[in-house]
Image (cartoon, rainbow, N blue to C red):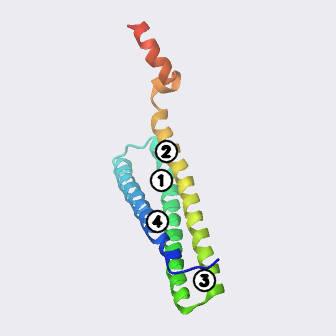
Amino acid sequence: MEITFTTPALLFPAISLLLLAYTNRYLALANLIRKLHDEYIRGEKNHLLISQIKILRIRINLVRQMQALGVFSFLCCVVTMYGVYMQWTELIKIIFAVSLISLLASLFISLIEITQSTKALELEISDMEELNQEGFFSNMFNKDKKE
C-alpha cells in the first residue's frame, strides 16, 4: 500500500468534526456539573443527585480520553504527512496505522460514554412513579378506560 499526502489528509475533516463533537459534549457536561453543584450547595442532596454526580465524573473522564486520543490521531496524521514529504515509506505506514487505531479507540470510548449518558437518563426518569409501575404503551391505551 502506498501512502500519499491525500491519505492522511482525508482524516483531517473527520477528526476535526469528531473533536468538535467531543468539545460540545464536554461543554454540556460542564454546564450540567455546575448546575448539579449549585443544587448540592443549596442542600438539595438526594440519592439521585449523588448518583448523577458519580456518573458525571466517569463521563467527564471518558470525554477527556476521547479528546486526547482524537488529538493524538490528528498529530499522527500530521507526522504521516511529514513522513511522506521526507519519504520515510516504512515509518509512515506504522504511524498512519497508529493514527487509525487511536481514532478507533476514541470512537470506542465514545460508545462507552454514550452508554453512561443513557444510564444517567435512566436514573433521571427512575423516580417517576408512573413509569416504574406501568409501561408507557399500557398507560396510553388504558388512559381511555380510566376516564
Q: Residue at x 45, y 29 (%)?
A: 128
Mark 2 and mark 3 lie on one chain; the one further toward the N terminus is 3
At mark 4, the secondary structure is: helix
Circle 4: residue type: Ala
Q: What is the CA distance from the residue labelled 1 to the residue labelled 4? A: 27 Å
Residue holding disc 2: 120
- Check if mark 2's residue and mark 1's residue have beta carbons within 8 Å: yes
Mark 3 and mark 1 lie on one chain; the one further toward the N terminus is 1
Q: What is the CA distance from the residue labelled 4 to the residue labelled 3? A: 20 Å
- Check if mark 1's residue and mark 4's residue have beta carbons within 8 Å: no
Mark 4 and mark 3 lie on one chain; the one further toward the N terminus is 4
At mark 1, the secondary structure is: helix
Mark 1 and mark 4 lie on one chain; the one further toward the N terminus is 4
Question: Would you call the spot at circle 4 few (<14 residues within 10 Å), some (14-19), or many (20 or more)?
Answer: few
Q: Residue at x 61, y 74 (%)?
A: 98
**Would residue 100 be visible to someone looking at this image?**
yes
Q: What is the CA distance from the residue labelled 2 to the residue labelled 3? A: 42 Å
Q: Nearer the viewer, mark 4 or mark 2?
A: 4
Q: What is the CA distance from the residue labelled 2 to the residue labelled 1? A: 8 Å
**Residue 30, image quadrant:** bottom left
Residue holding disc 4: 14
| Residue at the outermost bottom position | 86
Q: What is the CA distance from the residue labelled 3 to the residue labelled 1? A: 38 Å
Q: Position of residue 137 (x, y in %)?
A: 49, 21
Residue holding disc 1: 56
